[in-house]
Image (cartoon, rainbow, N blue to C red):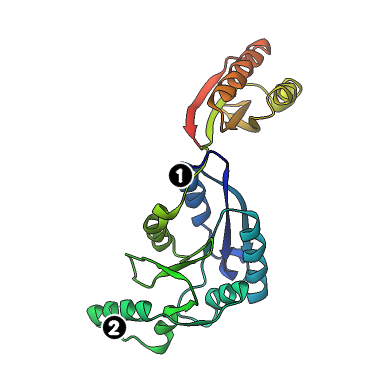
Amino acid sequence: MSDRIVSAAVVVIGNEILSGRTADRNLPFLATRLNELGIQLREARVVPDLEDEIVRAVNETRARHDYVFTTGGIGPTHDDITGDAIAKAFAVGIDYHAEAVAILKAHYANTGAELNTARLRMARVPAGAELIDNPVSKAPGYQIGNVFVLAGVPAIMQAMFESLKHKLVGGLPVRSLAIAAYLAEGAIAKGLGELAGRHPEVDLGSYPFYRQGRFGTSIVGRSTDPDRLAAAAAELRQLMRDLGAEPLEESTNSPG
């Protein structure tokens, strides 16, 4: 584990996400798993199946973060262009990877399906990339530089992530807690702002809710320093009591 903050970005690729036809389920999974490993997800982008858009997003995020994860666009159809875009982003060639071809040949021989030209496209890998195991459907993902190229289908993407996680080196883990009270945001806003000013190392977020016919606010605190998080939480509880509401503990000191 590193003694610094390690950051990551996710680039979600696919017209189906932007059109609303498919709801993305990969981002929440990656955000949760990365945080458990001490890696903070600092940026997420959704881009269409356009090569230049993918190249731009990958190059910008890989320059800013320790790790980048792309999801989608590595299947057998004409609109699966992630591989070519990644090769262009790294200024390398792309060709059939001998090990990936062997994996697909064995898989389709075992299933009895034909390894046709379209399916063979899934063995095209940018030069210099290392394969990422896909225990679900066998067509591998790959890593090139600090970029991990994963499938878009959630079950496959998740299995790929579990295959690669040993390569990731996390930093300071972020701890979080949530404390709620039946106070409107407007009532707590001034005191919360002052509290945030006294604890700049703690990220405080305010989230209103409506439960059982009453308005309330949930305050989520996040920090890499558990002691400072605890100090801010103690002041927050007192602030709520001073405003006439009893603090409601929603979660305590959990990663997130």
The amino acid beneath tag 1 is: Leu
Residue at x 71% of width, y 23% of height: 192
Q: Position of residue 242 (x, y in %)?
A: 67, 10
Q: Is residue 9 left or right of residue 26?
A: right
Q: Secondary structure at mark 1?
A: loop
The residue shown at (57%, 78%) is: 92
First in sequence: mark 2 or mark 1?
1
Comparing 42 with 5, the one in front is 5
Residue at 53%, 20% in the rendered image: 248
Name the residue furthest bottom. Answer: 117
As displayed, is residue 58 above or below residue 223? below
> Is residue 122 left or right of 193 when viewed as pictured?
left
Q: Residue placed at 37% from the left, 58% from the top?
A: 163
Q: Nearer the viewer, residue 242 or 96?
A: 96
Pick the front one: 33 or 208: 33
Identify the image quadrant of residue 205. Answer: top right
SS for callout 2: loop
Q: Mark 2: which amino acid?
A: Ala
Which label number is shown at residue 113? 2
- Give the Cα distance between marks 2 and 1: 38 Å
> What residue is pinned by disc 1?
37
Question: Closer to the observer: label 2 or label 1?
Answer: 1
- Residue 157 seen by the camera: yes
Residue sitting nearer the eye, 84 or 74 = 84
**Residue 64 percent location from the top left of the image:** 65, 55
Check whether the beta carbons of the residues at disc 2 and disc 1 lie within 8 A of each other.
no
Picture coordinates of residue 110 (x, y %)? Answer: 23, 78
